[in-house]
């Protein structure tokens, strides 16, 4: 059978919507667009009412400058910005072999010390000579006193012997008087002879009493002589004694002057020691890192030969990772929604997608924001009208903010302040 030939079916022609259908489509599109815009506006309004975001934010820190402690030639070790430093690490030294002012002061003190020591030596010689003369006078005075004691002792001994003889004579005279009185009673002798014997006894008794008084006086005088006193007349000082008193007074004056000179010598020696320490410190001073931190910038590169500097010239700047914070600029309209201690979310804009927790530590506005950046690593930008500078403390320090990355100082961030 012959094959039948079938004709291809033609595709139906698309029908265009009618004008009433197009109007319905655009009406629904407009409704959807309006709902979307309303939703977007509501979302933005919700964000504005729920949190505050910073317009500009960056990590900041305090800059610590190291200055030359003394004038001289400074030599720093090879340092580069970003290099980590340990507290007390030696960064270099300053040498100053010449310091004419301190050296002149030291020479003047040495001269004063030599003069004071010579004056003390003169006082020592005078005191030694006066003490020698005093020793001689004291020796002569002691000899004189010993001789006087011997003289009075001999007189006392002689009077004691005379008293003994007088007592013996008194005893004999009393015996004779008694004998004659008995003879008178017996009629052997006359009364005249008995009276003569009695008279001799009374004279002997008077002699004994006189010798006893004389012995007592001599004993008292001897005791006075031993104590340096004189009883028989007004006390008169001899020439050696007067000279001895003058020497004692002179020795006291010389001793006081020598003590004054000794005090002066000790003070001058202490001043010399202090000025020598100053000269030693002024000749060489080590430059050390005061804290643990990072080299921020090197103001004066000294090289191998060093450069001359005066005291107080800046050497380098460093920052510490322990004292970093976030400086954020926000709209002044949000001032009432911010408070010190409020929590903040910090997002690093370095591509690491790192988030950090923070807390507001200060809020500055107006001129206070302008003057706040004089001692910080990154001063705040020029004033933008109706903006606040908010400083946020970092509650955590991720490795991205370590010393190898300048503690992250200067890095941009975004800050959202939670209500």
Image (spheres, rainbow, N blue to C red):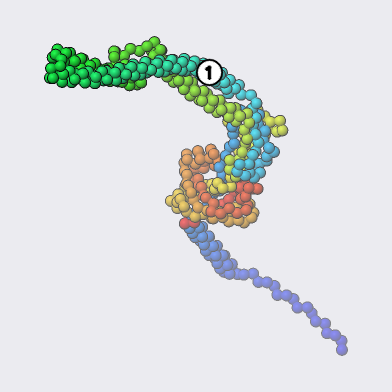
State the residue in front, 6 or 273: 273
Q: Is residue 326 left or right of residue 187?
A: right
Q: Could one spot residue 249 in this view of the protein?
A: no
Q: Quadrant of residue 173?
A: top left
Q: Is residue 198 left or right of residue 67?
A: left
State the residue in front, 75 or 249: 249
Look at 48% across and 49% down and name the residue there. Answer: 361
The residue singled out by tag 1 in the image is 121
Q: Quadrant of residue 203?
A: top left
Tell me how many marks there are: 1
Where's residue 230, x and y in %? 31, 16
Look at 60% across and 54% down and name the residue there. Answer: 398
- Compared to residue 135, the image places residue 417 above or below, namely below
From the image, which quarter does the N terminus lie in? Answer: bottom right
Where's residue 129, x and y in %? 49, 15
State the residue in front, 136 or 231: 231
State the residue in front, 248 or 39: 248
Look at 58% across and 56% down and name the residue there. Answer: 355
Farthest residue, direction top: 239
Where's residue 10, x and y in %? 74, 76
Farthest residue, direction bottom: 1
- Dot 1 alpha-carbon crowd within 10 angstroms: few under 14, some 14 to 19, many 20 or more: some
- Compared to residue 145, the image places residue 357 above or below, namely below
Where's residue 43, x and y in %? 51, 60
Mark 1: which secondary structure?
A: helix
- Compared to residue 33, the image places residue 237 above or below, namely above
Q: Is residue 154 left or right of residue 111?
A: left
Q: Could one spot residue 183 in this view of the protein?
A: yes
């Amino acid at each position: 059978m012959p094959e039948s030939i079938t004709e291809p079916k033609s595709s139906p022609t698309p029908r265009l919507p009618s004008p009433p259908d197009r109007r319905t489509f655009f009406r629904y599109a407009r409704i959807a667009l309006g709902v979307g815009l309303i939703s977007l506006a509501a979302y933005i309004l919700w964000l504005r009412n729920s949190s505050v975001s910073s317009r500009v934010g960056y990590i900041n820190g305090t800059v610590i400058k190291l200055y030359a402690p003394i004038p001289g030639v400074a030599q720093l070790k090879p340092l580069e910005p970003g290099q980590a430093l340990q507290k007390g690490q030696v960064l270099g030294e300053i040498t100053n072999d010449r310091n004419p002012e301190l050296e002149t002061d030291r020479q003047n003190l040495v001269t004063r010390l030599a003069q004071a020591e010579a004056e003390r030596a003169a006082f020592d010689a005078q005191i030694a000579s006066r003490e020698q003369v005093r020793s001689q006078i004291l020796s002569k005075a002691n000899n004189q006193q010993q001789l006087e004691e011997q003289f009075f002792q001999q007189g006392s001994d002689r009077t004691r012997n005379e008293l003994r003889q007088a007592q013996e004579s008194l005893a004999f005279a009393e015996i004779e008087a008694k004998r004659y009185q008995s003879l008178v009673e017996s009629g052997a002798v006359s009364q005249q002879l008995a009276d003569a014997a009695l008279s001799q006894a009374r004279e002997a008794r008077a002699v004994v009493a006189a010798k006893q008084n004389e012995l007592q006086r001599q004993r008292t005088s001897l005791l006075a002589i031993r104590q340096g006193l004189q009883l028989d007349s007004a006390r008169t000082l001899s020439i050696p004694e007067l000279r001895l008193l003058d020497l004692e007074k002179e020795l006291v004056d010389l001793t006081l002057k020598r003590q004054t000179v000794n005090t002066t010598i000790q003070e001058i020696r202490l001043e010399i020691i202090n000025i020598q320490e100053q000269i030693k410190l002024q000749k060489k001073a080590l430059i050390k890192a005061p804290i643990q931190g990072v080299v921020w910038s090197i103001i004066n590169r000294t090289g191998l030969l060093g450069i001359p500097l005066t005291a107080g010239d800046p050497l380098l700047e460093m920052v510490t990772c322990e004292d970093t914070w976030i400086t954020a600029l926000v709209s002044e309209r949000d001032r009432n929604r911010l408070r010190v201690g409020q929590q903040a979310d910090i997002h690093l804009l370095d591509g690491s997608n790192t988030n950090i927790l923070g807390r507001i530590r200060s809020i500055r506005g107006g001129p206070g924001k302008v003057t706040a950046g004089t001692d910080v690593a990154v001063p705040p930008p020029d004033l933008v009208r109706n903006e606040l500078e908010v400083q946020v403390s970092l509650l955590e320090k991720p490795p991205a903010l370590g010393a190898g990355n300048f503690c992250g100082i200067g890095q941009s961030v975004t800050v959202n302040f939670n209500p």
